[in-house]
Image (cartoon, rainbow, N blue to C red):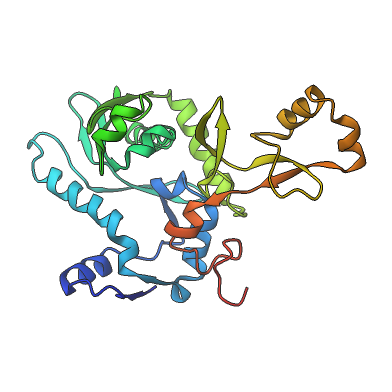
Amino acid sequence: MHLTNKLGYPDAYVNRVRKGIYKPKEERIGATSLIDAPMVRKLLLGKWDDIVLDVNDFFKMHRGIAWHEYLEAGLPEEVEGENLDVIEYSPLNISLKIDIWDEENGIIADYKTCSPWAIVFGQEKKWEEQLNVYAWAKRTQGFEVKKLIAYIFLWDWSSYDAGRDPNYPQQTFYTKELPLWDFAKQENFVNERLEYHSNPKECTAEEKWQQNKLSIDGQTVIVNGPVYAICKKDKKSAMRVLPSIDKCMEYIEQKNMVSAFKSGNIYIDKREGNCRRCNEYCNCRFVCPYSGLMKGK
């Protein structure tokens, strides 16, 4: 991977970014990579020397890393902080770093630094998966795990947005206890993810952070994945935009437009929406054949 510095960040920042970059290992997979898109890991392994990114691409990630390091310095002596664990497994060993491992009380805790919108759009599902992989790893080592906790710090929290939107997080910090699965469910999940990684394919809409805007009852909402527009032939604007083809067909029937649909005067247009990860955040976006950003594509 090659780095540029188009904005002229100071050497200290550039060097810190460089020290934090490493190529994945063929024989093992990190817990966070395990729950992530297989295509990302495949491209990192196969296209590492072709990837060119700017140090500015790492700003948000390293702000989170700095906060983790700050908090780790304040941990009580009896609590274990970030240490690399590698679980020998087949077909890939699994590596992980747990932010807090309280062996005496059987608690695994993780610091989460994110935008308030990560809460709005349901990022907690990924956190639940990640911490249950951690719990599985500790259980395979013979430890008892009783509780999973996420300590959530919200960057760029807005009191204005909190005041006008009840769905927006109402404070800057949350403690969230996450569901602890039984060991069989955890192991099944690990094995299913390893199988998923064995045959990498184009990322799903969820993995691409694919989003669209919909108007529901006069309110504009963001939905993940594609939406479907009911359009009239020779008209640019859609008659209605809905989250699924089934909903479109229901609307067409309700409005007595079935004949027009069958004749082609009314049609359904699938709108993929904005894939935010592909466009802005994925480290492989310039070498990915599916992003639309690869040179020469």
Residue 284, percent across and down?
48, 64
The answer to whether residue 15 of the structure is visible from this angle is yes
Up-down relation of residue 48 to residue 195 (above or below): below
In this rendering, would 82 be left or right of 257?
left
Question: Which residue is located at x 58 percent, y 46 percent?
Answer: 205
Residue 226, percent across and down?
62, 43
Q: Quadrant of the N terminus?
A: bottom left
Question: Which residue is located at x 40 percent, y 33 percent?
Answer: 120
Question: Which one is in front, 285 or 157?
Answer: 157
Up-down relation of residue 12 to residue 63 (above or below): below
Question: Which one is in front, 38 or 282?
Answer: 282
Question: Which one is in front, 85 or 254?
Answer: 254
Residue 51, percent across and down?
45, 72
Q: Quadrant of the C terminus?
A: bottom right
**Image quadrant where residue 138 sits:** top left
Question: Which residue is located at x 55 percent, y 65 percent?
Answer: 288
Residue 27, percent across and down?
45, 58
The total number of labels drawn is 0
Up-down relation of residue 31 to residue 249 (above or below): below
**Image quadrant where residue 16 sits:** bottom left
In this rendering, would 171 be left or right of 263?
left
Question: Which one is in front, 5 or 21?
Answer: 5
The answer to whether residue 145 of the structure is visible from this angle is no
In this rendering, would 217 be left or right of 284?
right
